[in-house]
Image (tube, rainbow, N blue to C red):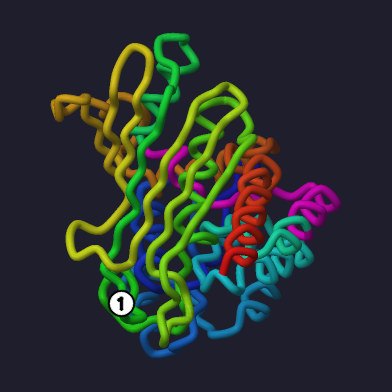
Amino acid sequence: MSKTIKVALAGAGAFGIKHLDGIRNIDGVEVISLISRDLEKTREVAAQYGIGHVTTDLSESLALKELDAVILCTPTQMHAEQTMACLKAGKHVQVEIPLADSLKGAQDVVALQKQTGLVAMCGHTRRFNPSHQYVHKEIQAGKFNIQQMDVQTYFFRRTNTNALGQPRSWTDHLLWHHAAHTVDLFAYQANSPIVQANAIQGPIHPVLGIAMDMSIQLKAASGAICTLSLSFNNDGPLGTFFRYIGDTATYIARYDDLFNGKEEKIDVSKVDVSMNGIELQDREFFAAIQEGREPNSSVARVFACYEVLHQLEQQLNANS
């Protein structure tokens, strides 16, 4: 495909705007439609980014004949259904993490992708952050092997707000959203399937209806282990912080930045064409469309993560 890829973006919230900013840096791509639930706010965002078509209805955008692809930054509970709607409409699709909030939802998406042959990718951004790419290249070169990953995913989210502190129309989830990043990344970096997984959780929030604290242990077939702590109660820096403890080094990854175990910054500016993980994720999506190939973090390649999340959910439900 040599022509401009015409894209619709659904979800003009905090993460949707990150995608719009990233796409601005990518040649041969044009966002032609913006979908979100609040029409006035959506029009404001569309005006800022020069997007001509605005709607509250995804199906209206999918009916645009010139449309090639869709990026979904919508509530978790809508991901599987909307991804399948895009594929059924003959559009390539990138859905933000998580792929689904149930194993069946993930299975249905993977099956439909195989049937259509379209590019269907999930936004497992950690595969694309320059920090994690640097570690991945060290592993691939045989210079570093993971012995343990220690990961903290912390937010202060006792009310239903997004990353910009704005009210949310849906409830976030520690297991099906935030843990998905680490479960997938651990197996990807260890280059080994997860063979053991355990989880415990704190009390259920009386209003939000979700656990606000969770602890997860993982073990890969290689013998590597991972300890993941998650909380919506932490009053401090927001985000996820990864410590890779290996046989030859220790690395600490904070989004796109990387440090060694002594907190000395490592230059990762030459790892890829950008220092923006979201932009790199989008570049992979569009390159896969242009080259007619399976992308890194395709729905098929991340599916094993959702099998583990399902197992952990069953465990938590049995112990609740």
Image position, residue 275 (x, y; %)? 30, 38
Residue placed at 32% from the left, 81% from the top? 159
Front-most of residues 55 and 317: 317
259 left or right of 196 in image: left
93 left or right of 265 in image: right
Q: How many marks?
A: 1
- In the displayed structure, 277 sits above or below 173; it is above
Q: In this view of the protein, can residue 73 be seen by the observer?
A: yes
Local SS, label 1: loop
Image position, residue 314 (x, y; %)? 66, 60
278 left or right of 164 in image: right
Q: Which residue is mark 1?
A: 158
- Quarter that holds the N terminus: top right
Q: Please rate how many residues cluster around mark 1, counting C-alpha atoms within 10 Å: few if below 14, some from 14 to 19, many from 20.
A: few
- In the displayed structure, 119 sits above or below 63; it is above
Front-most of residues 162 and 7: 162
Front-most of residues 13 and 108: 108
Residue placed at 15% from the left, 30% from the top? 263
Q: Amino acid at mark 1?
A: Arg
User: Hey, which quadrant is residue 43 in on the image?
Assistant: bottom left
Q: In this view of the protein, can residue 33 be seen by the observer?
A: no
- Quarter that holds the C terminus: bottom right
User: Hey, which quadrant is residue 253 in on the image?
Assistant: top left
175 left or right of 113 in image: left
Numbered range of the magenta stretch: 108-129
Image position, residue 198 (x, y; %)? 55, 48
